Image (cartoon, rainbow, N blue to C red):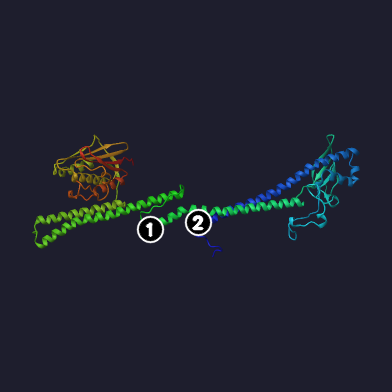
Amino acid sequence: MALFPTPKSIKTKLFLTMLMASSGVAICMFLVMQWSFDRGFLNYVNTQDREQSAALSASLAIEYASADSWKQLARNPQKWHQLISGSSPDLFSSPPRHKKGPGHPPIEHRRPPKADLQRPEPPPHRRRPPPNQQRPRVALFDADKNTVFGPPEGARVFSLSPITLNEQTIGYLGIKPIKELSDAHDLVFVQEQSQTFLLIALVMMVISMLLSIPIAGHLVKPIKHLEKGTQRLTSGKFDTQIPVITRDELGTLSTNFNILANTLKENESARQQWVADISHELRTPLAILKGEIEALEDGIRPLTPENIISLGQEVEHLTHLVGDLYELSMSDIGALNYQRCPTDILPILEHCAETFKDQFSSKNITLSFDSMNLDKAALFVDPQRIKQLVNNLLKNSYRYTDKNGNSVLTIEKGHNEMLIHLQDSSPGVAKEEIPRLFERLYRVDSSRNRASGGAGLGLAICSNIVTAHGGTINAQPSPQGGLWVTVRLPITHV
């Protein structure tokens, strides 16, 4: 079991992530600033010491010139301390004091002795103990780096700077760099800066926490809309739409959600219409069959071969309708078997036109075929499906073309495609109805109606066959007064 439970809310996760990230940055900034300031302040103090050593070097050069050697100064340590005190008093190192740590109260809480309270403030900017309580942090070496004044370790622990007289090096002044602060004022300053840095880091963490709450809420808002919209969608409310409030990936997801909801709404409407249309299409022939059979049973109509043929026609119409529905459903789910091969479709079109000529002649409709002087129309298609496509187009033209009309089937070669046209005479189709002609079970109510014998599935099947071959099919008004259907099939080389 985890020590801390994992938050389930995305808003909480975002808030904690942003808070931890900003807090980590603030803490790292505090540590880096503290380290940089401590190091920089020590470098600053050591740089000041090197600048002060220049005056001491000048005094030592004068002292050397008076005796032409370091011997006289070497015998007078008091003079050495006086030179340091007079020119560079900060180069004395006092014993460690006022350091923070266990058993030491903060510097600002140390109370001075009562005797010191009555004394006036000393003029120097740094108060130091008397020189006799201090040890100098400087050493003097001759030109050969032999110790004149300094510890027994020699020159290796000092930073050396040459002492010159008349452009000649007469010795070296060594300064021991400060590695930690011991002056009370320096320590107070460093402590105040550390407290300031810590306060800044804490303020940044608090500001980050206050800013993380509204930012997390703003980022999660589109997700909340998606969650509620999905719940409505799963309950069947396909009219659900969610607001698109961002232009990022969540905004794109919200837009796609709205498109999905619209698609589901349209599919649901199409499904309901599809079920209603199928029921209506099946009800009509079944009602006719039922009425005629009851008439035969009641003796209203005699059982004659003519009446039996009428019943057979209704059964054939019903069988044809069920077959079309089955074929269309198989085409929708991609279950139709397409056996494509290189095929010259020109003979197929000629055969279909020749087959329908007698049927068209029964209505006194002239059917003609024009190959546009093509010798060959080779495509990579399923020849049986192409034949079915042309037959359905011709059946549609036969059913809905008035008597004494004409229908023209043509084929031509376009740019990387083969075009099949079928134009017939009146009646025509209104422009607003043309885009819906390839919908299943759709018929124009005015002239191309059920009385002509169609179920409104032929063009829908044609559309599926053309789409399966990678082509397109569309319709427009014909110059002859009827409908002009154009099929475009791509020319593929295999």
Q: Secondary structure at mark 1?
A: helix
Residue 482: % across, % down: 21, 41
Q: Quadrant of the C terminus?
A: top left
Determine which quarter of the picture holds residue 19: bottom right
Q: Circle 2: is it few (<14), some (14-19), or many (20+) Cα within 10 Å?
A: many
The disc at residue 11 is: 2
Gap between marks 2 and 1 measured at Cα: 24 Å
Pointer 1: what residue? Answer: 234
Q: Is residue 27 visible?
A: no
Q: Earlier in the sequence, mark 2 or mark 1?
A: 2
Residue 333: % across, % down: 31, 52
Indicate the amino acid at tag 1: Thr
Q: Quadrant of the N terminus?
A: bottom right
Closer to the eye: label 2 or 1: 2
Indicate the amino acid at tag 2: Lys
Instruction: Please tell me whether residue 342 is drawn above or below residue 212 in the rendered image.
Output: above
Residue 140: % across, % down: 84, 44
Left or right, 211 with reference to 379? right
